């Protein structure tokens, strides 16, 4: 049994809509624990590192613009298989494709908004989680 850590973000749309508590409730209901929690407006530097894999893609600039547009809740969660587990809780990237019962499926609004407004981020692998936690919480 491997205890993993993952980086979870409640993005500006989720924060603004008051969904932070709902996201954290689902994390805890699943049995994961919160080990670091912060509310902040991310800098461009942090976002550029965080989304480095997407640099040059058409949605990169709008994504950074959106992510720096307001407050974000950043959390480090811990638990058995929590990297894959939180991705399952989040649902498909595009809220249109996200299944009911997932965060994006239940709360994602796919009308009049871009795909980037999909409420949450979750690390996609253990390696990504380590990298991302170092970017968001360099002191940890
Ligand atoms: P995920 O957040 O599910 O890991 P990703 O890493 O592929 O997805 O993309 C990062 C974010 O970028 C995603 O949450 C929303 C945005 N995004 C991805 N693909 C997009 C697209 N085709 N158009 C607009 N935004 C997109
Ligand atoms: Mg990703």
Image: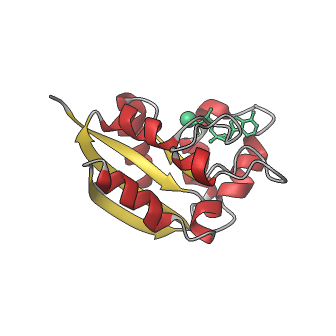
On screen, residue 55 above or below 110: above
Toward the viewer: 89 or 45? 89
Q: Where is residue 90 in the image (x, y as percent from the top left)?
A: 50, 43
Left/right of residue 54 with respect to residue 139 in the rendered view? right
Q: Is residue 102 visible?
A: yes
Q: Where is residue 42 in the image (x, y as percent from the top left)?
A: 57, 61
Report the front residue among 88 and 117: 88
Residue 72: percent from left, percent from top: 54, 63
In the displayed orientation, state which residue is furthest to the left. Answer: 1
Image quadrant where one finds the N terminus: top left
Q: Which residue lies furthest to the right in this view?
A: 112
In the figure, 3 relative to 77: above or below?
above
Locate the C terminus and report the quarter of the image it occupies.
bottom left
Q: In which quarter of the image is residue 38?
A: bottom left
The answer to whether 140 appears left or right of 57 in the picture is left
Confirm whether residue 138 shows in the render: no
In what quadrant does ligand 1 lie? Answer: top right
**Apparent side of residue 120 relative to residue 55 in the rendered image (left or right):** left
Along the line of sight, the residue nearer the viewer: 52 or 21? 21
Which residue does the image show at 67% across and 42% down from the upper left? 95
- Which residue is at 48% across, 65% downward? 20
Q: Quadrant of residue 69?
A: bottom right
Rendered location of residue 81, percent (x, y) = 28, 33
């Amino acid at each position: 049994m491997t205890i993993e850590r993952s980086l979870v973000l409640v993005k500006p749309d989720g924060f603004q809509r008051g969904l932070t508590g709902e996201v954290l409730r689902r994390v805890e209901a699943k049995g994961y624990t919160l080990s670091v929690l912060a509310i902040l407006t991310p800098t461009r530097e942090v976002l550029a590192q965080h989304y480095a894999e997407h640099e040059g893609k058409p949605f990169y600039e709008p994504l950074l613009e959106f992510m720096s547009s307001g407050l974000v809740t950043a959390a480090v969660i811990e638990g058995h298989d929590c990297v894959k587990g939180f991705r399952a809780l989040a649902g498909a990237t595009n809220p249109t494709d996200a299944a009911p019962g997932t965060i994006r499926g239940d709360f994602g609004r796919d009308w009049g908004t871009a795909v980037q407004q999909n409420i949450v981020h979750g690390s996609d692998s253990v390696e990504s989680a380590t990298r991302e936690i170092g970017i968001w919480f360099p002191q940890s």
